[in-house]
Image (cartoon, rainbow, N blue to C red):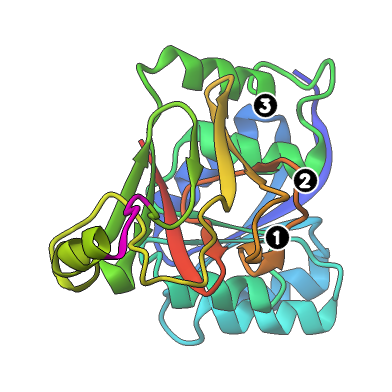
Amino acid sequence: MIIRKEKILIVDDAKFMRVTIRKMLEKLGFNEIYEADNVEEALKIYEKRKPDFVTMDITMPGDSGLEGLRQIKEMNPKAKILMVSAVSSKNNILQAFSHGAVYFLAKPFTIESFTAVMSKIFDLDQPGAGPLGLSDAKSAAVKESGPVLTLIMQDDNVEITVNESAEIGRCCKCKTADEKRKNTDRCNISSDRRDFIPCKVITVSEHQAKITLENGEFFLTPLPESESTTKLNNMLLTAGRKYHLMRADILSLGTADFTVNMK
Protein backbone atom coordinates (compact mmCIF):
# COMPACT_ATOMS: atom_id res chain seq x y z
CA MET A 1 0.00 0.00 0.00
CA ILE A 2 1.22 3.49 -0.87
CA ILE A 3 1.32 5.80 2.17
CA ARG A 4 -0.48 9.06 1.37
CA LYS A 5 1.09 12.33 2.48
CA GLU A 6 -2.12 14.34 2.60
CA LYS A 7 -3.45 15.51 5.97
CA ILE A 8 -7.08 14.73 6.82
CA LEU A 9 -9.39 16.25 9.44
CA ILE A 10 -12.46 14.32 10.63
CA VAL A 11 -15.15 16.45 12.30
CA ASP A 12 -17.97 14.53 13.99
CA ASP A 13 -19.40 14.59 17.51
CA ALA A 14 -19.92 10.80 17.44
CA LYS A 15 -16.71 8.97 18.39
CA PHE A 16 -17.77 5.73 16.67
CA MET A 17 -18.22 7.67 13.41
CA ARG A 18 -14.78 9.25 13.71
CA VAL A 19 -13.30 5.78 14.29
CA THR A 20 -15.19 4.38 11.29
CA ILE A 21 -13.98 7.13 8.94
CA ARG A 22 -10.44 6.89 10.32
CA LYS A 23 -10.33 3.16 9.56
CA MET A 24 -11.57 3.80 6.02
CA LEU A 25 -8.89 6.45 5.51
CA GLU A 26 -6.16 4.22 6.91
CA LYS A 27 -7.14 1.44 4.50
CA LEU A 28 -6.70 3.95 1.69
CA GLY A 29 -3.17 4.77 2.86
CA PHE A 30 -3.78 8.00 4.81
CA ASN A 31 -2.05 8.14 8.19
CA GLU A 32 -1.84 11.84 9.16
CA ILE A 33 -5.37 12.14 10.48
CA TYR A 34 -6.75 14.67 12.98
CA GLU A 35 -10.10 14.58 14.80
CA ALA A 36 -12.50 17.16 16.25
CA ASP A 37 -15.89 16.65 17.88
CA ASN A 38 -17.20 20.18 17.29
CA VAL A 39 -16.82 23.09 14.87
CA GLU A 40 -14.88 25.33 17.27
CA GLU A 41 -12.19 22.70 17.78
CA ALA A 42 -12.17 21.91 14.06
CA LEU A 43 -11.46 25.54 13.15
CA LYS A 44 -8.49 25.62 15.54
CA ILE A 45 -7.04 22.42 14.09
CA TYR A 46 -7.65 23.61 10.54
CA GLU A 47 -5.86 26.90 11.15
CA LYS A 48 -2.90 25.17 12.81
CA ARG A 49 -2.54 22.00 10.70
CA LYS A 50 -3.95 23.18 7.36
CA PRO A 51 -5.32 19.75 6.34
CA ASP A 52 -5.73 18.87 2.67
CA PHE A 53 -9.19 17.41 3.18
CA VAL A 54 -12.02 17.59 5.75
CA THR A 55 -14.98 15.32 6.46
CA MET A 56 -17.63 17.35 8.29
CA ASP A 57 -20.80 16.12 9.98
CA ILE A 58 -23.75 18.50 9.65
CA THR A 59 -25.60 17.96 12.94
CA MET A 60 -23.41 18.62 15.98
CA PRO A 61 -23.76 20.45 19.31
CA GLY A 62 -22.97 24.15 18.99
CA ASP A 63 -22.37 25.41 15.46
CA SER A 64 -23.64 23.10 12.73
CA GLY A 65 -21.33 21.53 10.20
CA LEU A 66 -22.75 23.87 7.56
CA GLU A 67 -21.46 26.81 9.60
CA GLY A 68 -18.12 25.03 9.96
CA LEU A 69 -18.04 24.53 6.19
CA ARG A 70 -18.74 28.22 5.63
CA GLN A 71 -16.03 29.37 8.04
CA ILE A 72 -13.38 27.01 6.66
CA LYS A 73 -14.16 28.17 3.11
CA GLU A 74 -13.68 31.74 4.32
CA MET A 75 -10.27 30.77 5.71
CA ASN A 76 -9.36 28.87 2.54
CA PRO A 77 -11.64 29.16 -0.52
CA LYS A 78 -9.88 26.13 -2.04
CA ALA A 79 -10.59 23.88 0.96
CA LYS A 80 -11.89 20.41 0.06
CA ILE A 81 -14.70 19.42 2.40
CA LEU A 82 -16.93 16.34 2.31
CA MET A 83 -20.19 16.80 4.21
CA VAL A 84 -21.80 13.77 5.88
CA SER A 85 -25.12 13.49 7.66
CA ALA A 86 -27.73 11.00 8.77
CA VAL A 87 -30.33 13.62 7.81
CA SER A 88 -29.97 13.74 4.03
CA SER A 89 -32.74 16.25 3.33
CA LYS A 90 -32.81 18.18 0.07
CA ASN A 91 -32.23 21.40 2.02
CA ASN A 92 -29.11 20.05 3.75
CA ILE A 93 -27.64 18.77 0.51
CA LEU A 94 -28.29 21.95 -1.46
CA GLN A 95 -26.90 24.11 1.36
CA ALA A 96 -23.76 21.96 1.53
CA PHE A 97 -23.08 22.40 -2.17
CA SER A 98 -23.98 26.10 -2.16
CA HIS A 99 -21.35 26.67 0.57
CA GLY A 100 -18.71 24.87 -1.47
CA ALA A 101 -18.68 21.24 -0.32
CA VAL A 102 -16.95 18.91 -2.78
CA TYR A 103 -19.48 16.17 -2.06
CA PHE A 104 -22.19 14.91 0.30
CA LEU A 105 -22.55 11.40 1.73
CA ALA A 106 -25.59 10.19 3.65
CA LYS A 107 -24.96 8.10 6.77
CA PRO A 108 -24.54 5.22 6.95
CA PHE A 109 -22.25 4.99 3.92
CA THR A 110 -20.16 2.08 2.69
CA ILE A 111 -16.42 1.80 2.12
CA GLU A 112 -17.25 1.61 -1.61
CA SER A 113 -19.11 4.94 -1.71
CA PHE A 114 -16.50 6.61 0.50
CA THR A 115 -13.67 5.25 -1.68
CA ALA A 116 -15.43 6.50 -4.82
CA VAL A 117 -15.52 10.04 -3.41
CA MET A 118 -11.90 9.92 -2.25
CA SER A 119 -10.87 8.57 -5.65
CA LYS A 120 -12.38 11.59 -7.38
CA ILE A 121 -10.39 13.93 -5.13
CA PHE A 122 -7.06 12.12 -4.77
CA ASP A 123 -6.86 9.93 -7.92
CA LEU A 124 -6.81 6.74 -5.89
CA ASP A 125 -7.63 4.74 -9.00
CA GLN A 126 -4.19 5.36 -10.46
CA PRO A 127 -1.83 2.33 -10.73
CA GLY A 128 -0.33 1.42 -7.36
CA ALA A 129 -2.98 3.23 -5.38
CA GLY A 130 -3.46 0.26 -3.08
CA PRO A 131 -6.03 -2.48 -2.54
CA LEU A 132 -9.02 -0.18 -2.04
CA GLY A 133 -8.79 2.06 -5.10
CA LEU A 134 -11.79 2.94 -7.26
CA SER A 135 -11.40 -0.21 -9.37
CA ASP A 136 -11.82 -2.31 -6.21
CA ALA A 137 -14.86 -0.30 -5.20
CA LYS A 138 -16.37 -1.08 -8.60
CA SER A 139 -15.49 -4.75 -8.27
CA ALA A 140 -17.14 -4.90 -4.85
CA ALA A 141 -20.26 -3.25 -6.24
CA VAL A 142 -20.41 -5.67 -9.17
CA LYS A 143 -20.27 -8.64 -6.79
CA GLU A 144 -23.46 -7.48 -5.15
CA SER A 145 -26.54 -8.85 -6.89
CA GLY A 146 -28.37 -6.29 -8.98
CA PRO A 147 -27.45 -2.72 -8.03
CA VAL A 148 -30.64 -0.65 -7.90
CA LEU A 149 -31.01 3.12 -8.27
CA THR A 150 -34.16 4.91 -7.17
CA LEU A 151 -35.17 8.49 -7.99
CA ILE A 152 -37.46 9.93 -5.32
CA MET A 153 -39.53 13.06 -5.97
CA GLN A 154 -40.93 13.84 -2.53
CA ASP A 155 -43.20 16.72 -3.56
CA ASP A 156 -45.17 14.57 -5.99
CA ASN A 157 -44.87 11.13 -4.37
CA VAL A 158 -42.96 9.79 -7.37
CA GLU A 159 -40.48 6.94 -6.94
CA ILE A 160 -38.78 5.59 -10.07
CA THR A 161 -36.62 2.47 -9.83
CA VAL A 162 -33.85 1.85 -12.38
CA ASN A 163 -32.31 -1.63 -12.36
CA GLU A 164 -29.98 -1.51 -15.35
CA SER A 165 -30.56 1.33 -17.79
CA ALA A 166 -33.44 3.60 -18.67
CA GLU A 167 -34.46 6.82 -20.34
CA ILE A 168 -36.21 9.18 -17.96
CA GLY A 169 -38.69 11.94 -18.66
CA ARG A 170 -42.31 12.88 -18.07
CA CYS A 171 -45.02 10.41 -19.03
CA CYS A 172 -46.57 11.09 -22.45
CA LYS A 173 -48.22 7.73 -23.12
CA CYS A 174 -51.72 9.11 -23.67
CA LYS A 175 -52.24 9.44 -27.44
CA THR A 176 -55.59 11.25 -27.46
CA ALA A 177 -57.25 13.98 -25.43
CA ASP A 178 -59.96 11.52 -24.35
CA GLU A 179 -57.36 9.02 -23.11
CA LYS A 180 -55.55 11.78 -21.22
CA ARG A 181 -58.81 12.95 -19.64
CA LYS A 182 -59.54 9.42 -18.37
CA ASN A 183 -56.12 9.13 -16.78
CA THR A 184 -56.04 12.59 -15.19
CA ASP A 185 -57.17 11.50 -11.72
CA ARG A 186 -54.91 8.44 -11.57
CA CYS A 187 -51.79 10.15 -12.94
CA ASN A 188 -51.97 13.79 -11.94
CA ILE A 189 -54.23 14.06 -8.90
CA SER A 190 -54.00 10.76 -7.02
CA SER A 191 -51.80 10.84 -3.92
CA ASP A 192 -50.74 7.23 -4.47
CA ARG A 193 -47.05 6.61 -5.07
CA ARG A 194 -46.19 6.54 -8.77
CA ASP A 195 -43.28 4.98 -10.65
CA PHE A 196 -43.36 7.57 -13.44
CA ILE A 197 -43.22 11.36 -13.77
CA PRO A 198 -46.81 12.56 -14.39
CA CYS A 199 -47.45 14.62 -17.51
CA LYS A 200 -48.52 17.62 -15.42
CA VAL A 201 -44.83 18.20 -14.60
CA ILE A 202 -44.38 20.16 -17.81
CA THR A 203 -40.87 21.36 -16.94
CA VAL A 204 -39.58 17.81 -17.52
CA SER A 205 -39.06 16.82 -21.15
CA GLU A 206 -40.45 13.56 -22.49
CA HIS A 207 -36.89 12.52 -23.36
CA GLN A 208 -34.82 14.24 -20.65
CA ALA A 209 -31.89 11.97 -19.76
CA LYS A 210 -30.53 8.45 -19.91
CA ILE A 211 -29.27 6.41 -16.94
CA THR A 212 -26.81 3.59 -17.52
CA LEU A 213 -25.21 0.99 -15.25
CA GLU A 214 -21.52 0.39 -15.92
CA ASN A 215 -19.28 -1.85 -13.81
CA GLY A 216 -21.71 -1.65 -10.92
CA GLU A 217 -22.02 2.16 -10.95
CA PHE A 218 -24.74 4.43 -12.33
CA PHE A 219 -24.18 7.27 -14.78
CA LEU A 220 -26.52 9.94 -16.14
CA THR A 221 -26.36 11.43 -19.65
CA PRO A 222 -28.63 14.42 -20.46
CA LEU A 223 -30.20 13.91 -23.89
CA PRO A 224 -29.60 16.51 -26.63
CA GLU A 225 -33.30 16.48 -27.62
CA SER A 226 -34.39 17.58 -24.14
CA GLU A 227 -35.96 21.02 -23.99
CA SER A 228 -35.46 21.27 -20.21
CA THR A 229 -32.29 21.79 -18.18
CA THR A 230 -30.72 18.95 -16.22
CA LYS A 231 -28.76 19.70 -13.03
CA LEU A 232 -26.82 17.54 -10.57
CA ASN A 233 -26.37 19.03 -7.10
CA ASN A 234 -27.34 22.41 -8.57
CA MET A 235 -24.66 22.17 -11.30
CA LEU A 236 -25.93 22.58 -14.87
CA LEU A 237 -25.11 19.49 -16.96
CA THR A 238 -24.06 19.37 -20.60
CA ALA A 239 -26.16 17.35 -23.05
CA GLY A 240 -24.41 14.21 -24.27
CA ARG A 241 -21.86 14.17 -21.45
CA LYS A 242 -21.83 11.33 -18.90
CA TYR A 243 -21.98 12.09 -15.15
CA HIS A 244 -21.40 9.73 -12.21
CA LEU A 245 -24.40 9.39 -9.88
CA MET A 246 -24.01 8.74 -6.16
CA ARG A 247 -26.33 8.18 -3.23
CA ALA A 248 -27.97 11.37 -1.86
CA ASP A 249 -27.28 13.36 -5.04
CA ILE A 250 -29.98 15.86 -5.99
CA LEU A 251 -30.96 15.43 -9.63
CA SER A 252 -33.01 18.29 -11.08
CA LEU A 253 -35.01 17.74 -14.26
CA GLY A 254 -36.36 21.14 -15.19
CA THR A 255 -37.80 22.40 -11.90
CA ALA A 256 -38.50 18.88 -10.55
CA ASP A 257 -35.99 17.73 -7.91
CA PHE A 258 -35.21 14.05 -7.23
CA THR A 259 -33.11 12.50 -4.48
CA VAL A 260 -30.88 9.64 -5.69
CA ASN A 261 -30.99 6.48 -3.58
CA MET A 262 -29.00 3.31 -4.18
CA LYS A 263 -29.11 -0.24 -2.87
Vertical comparison of 20 with 200: above or below: above
**Are discs 1 and 2 less than 8 Å apart at CB?**
yes
Q: Which mark is residue 102?
A: 1
Quadrant where the N terminus is found in the figure: top right
Viewer-side residue, 41 vs 11: 11
Mark 3 burial class by Cα count in 10 Å: few <14, some 14-19, many 20+? many
**Residue 67 percent location from the top left of the image:** 59, 84
Earlier-in-chain disc, 1 versus 2? 1
Q: What predominant SS class does the magenta segment belong to?
A: loop
Locate residue 117, reporting x and y percent: 65, 43
**How far is disc 1 from disc 2 in space, using C-alphas?**
9 Å
Crowd band around label 1 with a 10 angstrom C-alpha radius: few (<14), some (14–19), many (20+): some
Q: Which residues are magenta?
A: 173-177
Quick check: is 174 in the magenta stretch? Answer: yes
**Residue situated in front as seen by the camera: 215 or 209:** 209
Q: Amino acid at mark 3?
A: Leu
The crowd level at tag 2 (other Cα within 10 Å; few <14, some 14-19, many 20+) is few
**Residue displayed at 79% across by 59% down:** 51
Give the quarter of the image for residue 181: bottom left
Q: Amino acid at mark 1?
A: Val
Q: Position of residue 152 (x, y in %)?
A: 35, 57
Q: Which residue is mark 3?
A: 134
The amino acid beneath tag 2 is Ile
